[in-house]
Amino acid sequence: MAFEIDDLDSLDPALVTQMLISTESRLRELHPELDLKRGVFHDTVMYYHSVLEAAIRTNLARYLSGRSLLEIERDPSLADSEVTDSVLSLYRLQRRPGTAGYGRLTIVLSGNTTVTVPSGSVWAANGQEFITTQVYSAKAEPETLANDSDRLIYQLSDGNYAFQIDVVATADGPAGKLTKDAKVIPNSQPFNYLTAYVTEDFEDGTAAQTNDSLLGELQEGMAAKALSNRINMRAALRNITSFANITDMSIVGFGDAEMLRDQHSILPLSYGGRVDWYIRGQPELRRVVLSKSAVLISKEYEHGVWQFSVGRDDAPGFFELRNVRLTGVNAAETAGGFTIVLEQRGLDLTGTGFIPDIETQEEGEYSRFQTAVVQFQDTVTNVTALEVGTTQLYEIEAVCTPLIAEIQTVVSSRDVRNHGADALIKAPIPCFVQINFTVNKKYSDQTPDLEGIKQEVMSAVNAVPFVGRLDASQICDAVHGYLRNSMSITGMDLFGRIRRPNGTDYYLRDSQSLVVKDDPAQMVTAKTVQFFLERENIAVNVENSVPVPV
C-alpha cells in the first residue's frame, strides 16, 4: 500500500527516540538484571527494534489519517492516496491520473537523402526524455510513401530540409509538455542531422491530481450537474470527461460589476439572464500554428504590407497572434517574425445554433465568436514585380487556451443551456508574466538545477486561481526545494502585461506582488484575469555571493 513508508531515514527522529525510551523502560521492568547501557545490545537490538516500531506506528497513523473524510481534511498531504480515493469515491469524485506529454518534432537535415529513425529513439529537452514508438522513414519522393510511418522530406526556405516525427514522454507530468519551437537533442543523430525542434505545443503532460486538489472539488462531487448556481455549473462541466482536466474557471453573472451583457436595454440597469464563464483549459499557454493566404495590399519600394483574416474557428478565444513568417521557414531560427502593423478584432455571430447575446467586440473578446483582420510588413519578399492583390502563404502562431469552442457548443445546446439565460464561454483575460531573480550561493556549492527551478516556478504561477494576485513568496516556495546549504534568493522582479478586451495593454511591476487593479468597465478584475508564464520568460541568475567562513 502507498501509505507504507519505503525509507526508514524518513522517520521522525523524535518518534524513534520515544520508542527507544519506551522499549528500555519495558525491558527494565521485565528484566532488571539486564545491562541496558549503550553497547551492542542497546545500539543494535533495542535501537533497531525502536526504528521498526516507529515505522509501524507511522504506517498506522498514515492509514488512519485517510480512513475518513474528517481525517483526510485535517492533513491531506499525509493521507494515503488509495484510501483517500476510496473515501472520496463515495462523493462521486475520482482522481485524475497523470498523463505523458506527446507531440511532433521537426528534424532539420542538410540533405534530402532517405533517413530512418528507429523505434525507441530518445530525444531530450528540459531534463525530460521522449521516445518514438515506431520506426520512421523519411523520404524525398511523395510516391515512395507507403504507410503512416513514412514521412516526406520537404525543403525549407534556407536551403535545408526537414521532416516530422511523433514522440511521447517517458514519464508523466508537466515537464513532458513541450512548447512550440523548443529545441530537442537526440541521443543518436540521424544522417545529415542539423537540429530539431518542437513543431507545435505538446498535448497532455499533466501531474496526477493531489489530495488537496481532490478535496477542493468535494462540493462539485456532491452537487447537481446543471447550469444553475456556480457550484453546480462547475460540477456539470467537470462531469464531462473531455472537460475534466480544466485548470480553473470563474463565473460572472447578475450582480457582478464585470457583467456588462445584462445591461442591453434602454435603462442602464442589470436585468440578469447572462453569464460570462471564464475557462482556463490548461495550465500553460497553447500556441497553434495557422496557415494563411495573405494578400498584398500596398507596396513601399521593394517590400510590402500584406493582410490575412483569422476566422472564429481557427483558434477560438485566442489571446494574441505572434511570429508571422513565410511558410517553410525554419521556425527554430526565426526571431519574432514579421511586424504586425494593424490588428482589428471583430465578431462572427452567424450560424444556425444558439448565439449568446453579444453587442460589442469587447463583450465577445476571447470567446469562440472572436475574429481578426491582420496587416503585417514582410521584410523578406521582394514585391517589385508583384501586383497589389497577389497572394502568398504564411504561418502565424495563435496564443490561446484550449476547449473554448467545445465548451461553448455544449453549454449552448438546447438540452443543456438554461432556458432563461445564456452562457458565453471566454478565455481568461491574460496577464503575461516575466520573472527574474538571483540565486546566491557559495563558490564551492554546485549550481542548482536551473531547468527544474524554471519548471517549478512556471507550474506555481500557472496554478494561481482567480484571485488577481501573484506573490513573490509563491515563487520562493516553488524554488525552496532546489536550494542547498546557505543558498538564498534576492533581486526578485515580477512583471506582468494584461491585454484588456479593448486591445490595450496594462502593465504591472513589483518586487513583492503583482495585484490586478479592478477595472470592471473593461471587465478586468480578479474574477476575470489569469496569470500565464512561459519558460522563456523566466530568468534565473546565479551568483557566488555567499561568503565562505574562514
Image (cartoon, helix red, strand yellow):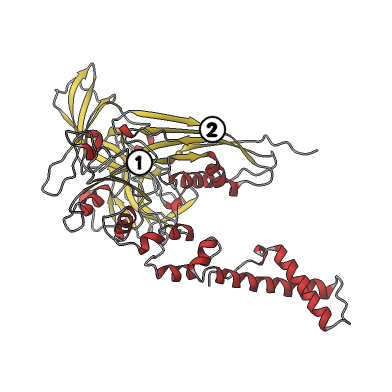
Q: Which residue is drawn at 30% across and 30% down?
A: 503
Q: Earlier in the sequence, mark 1 or mark 2?
A: 2
The residue depicted at 54 percent of the width and 60 percent of the height is 77
Residue 210 in percent (x, y) is at: 47, 59
Under mark 2, the amino acid is Ser
Q: Residue 528 carries which label?
A: 1
Placement of 328 over or under 222, stated as above or below:
above
Nearer to us in this view, 360 or 43: 360
Q: In which quarter of the image is the C terminus?
A: top right
Of tags 1 and 2, the one toward the viewer is 1
Residue 454 percent location from the top left of the image: 51, 43
* Residue at image point 41% right, 57% down: 100
Residue 160 image-quadrant placement: top left
At label 1, the amino acid type is Thr
Q: Name the residue under label 2.
A: 511
Q: In which quarter of the image is residue 26?
A: bottom right
